[in-house]
Amino acid sequence: MWAKFKAFLFGERPQAHLPERVRQSIATHQFESEILIGWVQLLLVGFFAALYTIAPKTSAGTGFTPVPWALAMYCLFTVIRLSFAYRRALPRVLLFASVIMDMGLLMVLIWSFHLQYEQPAPFYLKAPTLLYVFIFISLRALRFDPKYVITAGIAGAVGWVILLLYALAGMTDPITRNYVLYLTSNMVLVGAEIDKILSILLVTLVLAVALVRARRLLTRAIVDHTAAHDLSRFVSPEIADKITTAEEALQPGDGETRFASVMFTDIEGFSTISEGMGPEELVGTLNEYFAAVSTVIDRHGGVITQFEGDAMLITFNTVTHDPDHAANAVRAAIGIQRIVHEQRFGNEIELKTRCGINTGQVVAGAVGTKERLLFTVHGDEVNIAARLEQLNKEYGTYILAAEETVHQAGGDYGFEAMGKVTVRGRAGETAVYAIRGLPRAEAGC
């Protein structure tokens, strides 16, 4: 029962063990919050100083004027603490001490009013400066740590109790129960002062509860964000963005039919190449290759939808809108050929790459089960692109494109008709074109 009440009051508790990178992210947020708190306090000091400067001095002739000194001390203290915050050199002890000192300086400032204005001590109990106690408490909420809010609230309440006791001790008959007399004289209405103390404590309690809830939400949000960021590395950023911005969670079978271009790539003879490599060298070589090739693909608006060993499935105009998708697919294929021709990977290995491109109606969406989904493209046109990639072996080519791709791409890409072939798995014939060499217009691919 108690556990349910705590969960209702404070929210669901985050996981007990947080990864180090999550703790570092929370710590970074708190350091930035401490810097923000310091700047807000510095602005408050400036506001106090400006207000004091332009306000009429009703205490003219009084020799003791502590307000400028208190403001100067608080300004110096805030600047020092802000410099420590920028250097991330604020240990917990110093933070707690600074919170208490904030309240202490404010209470000393309020206490000094009766001296500056030459009035009995109860005079300062009616000072509106007390309201700044609530500002100081709420400022601590920017750190998302309830301990400092509670410390500020307790310090404010204790400070006001001390001021009340000091005011009562300094007069022989200071207490009244007459509210009008309380407002128009220097007498003390104890109930009114208790109300102030209770208000400070209740505001502190409400903020502390809100901060516990907010901190738990923040922790879960950072954990979820970190997990999403890590998982997004396993899919393209475009697919990750499409999934996370969907109005409703994707379900198996959710998809969208698009007129798009699809390209399959595969490294020629990679099985033979990999036989002479250890696992670490193999992975390192592939990583270098994928990094270089993905740069070209990104440049032309392609989305790597799937990795399979050394092969890739790349789509254009499926996740992101691209009216020139066929031409961009051809440009990307030409760019890949240039990269693998000019660059060596791993232990100076040449990785010749075959590409098959097709354009047509495809379905882009989620397949799998409710527990595990894969965002991919499927359809007959996708199968043709895969078959074209494999047909490069028979023609001794490295880029083969279907007729629809050639038609949609337009331009002078050096297409050469290879005739019509019956692609495995399809009854009808498919006109096939190869790209021999790099055309002048695409020298920058």
Image (cartoon, grey):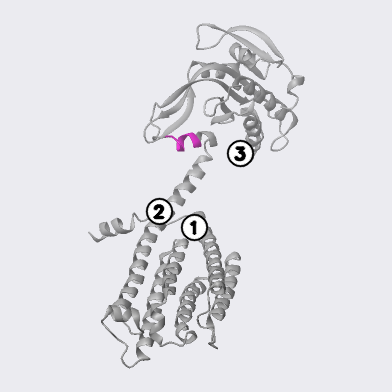
Q: Are marks 2 and 3 in contact (CB under 8 Å)?
A: no
Drawn side of residue 395 relative to residue 304, left or right: right
Residue type beneath disc 1: Ile
Q: Are marks 2 and 1 in contact (CB under 8 Å)?
A: no
What's the distance in space between the residues labelled 1 and 3, CA to CA? 33 Å
Which of the pair 33/266 is nearer the observer? 33
Which residue in the protein does label 3 denote?
Answer: 283
Q: Nearer the viewer, mark 1 or mark 3?
A: 1
x, y percent for residue 133: 43, 71
Crowding at dot 1, Cα within 10 Å, few <14 / some 14-19 / many 20+, comes out as some
**Residue 287 versus residue 256 in the image, above or below:** below
What's the distance in space between the residues labelled 2 and 3, CA to CA? 38 Å
**Residue 75 versus residue 222 in the image, above or below:** below
Residue type beneath disc 3: Val
x, y percent for residue 393: 64, 17
Which residue in the protein does label 2 denote?
Answer: 217
Which of the pair 213/24 is nearer the observer? 213
Residue type beneath disc 2: Leu
What's the distance in space between the residues labelled 2 and 1, CA to CA? 12 Å
Magenta stretch holds residue 226: no
Find residue 330 and report its image quarter: top right
Residue stretch rendered in magenta on the structure: 240-246
Drawn side of residue 18 relative to residue 351, left or right: left
Q: Are marks 1 and 3 in contact (CB under 8 Å)?
A: no
Magenta stretch holds residue 242: yes
Magenta span: chief secondary structure:
helix
Residue 26: mark = 1
Secondary structure under tag 3 reads: helix
The residue shown at (47%, 54%) is 19
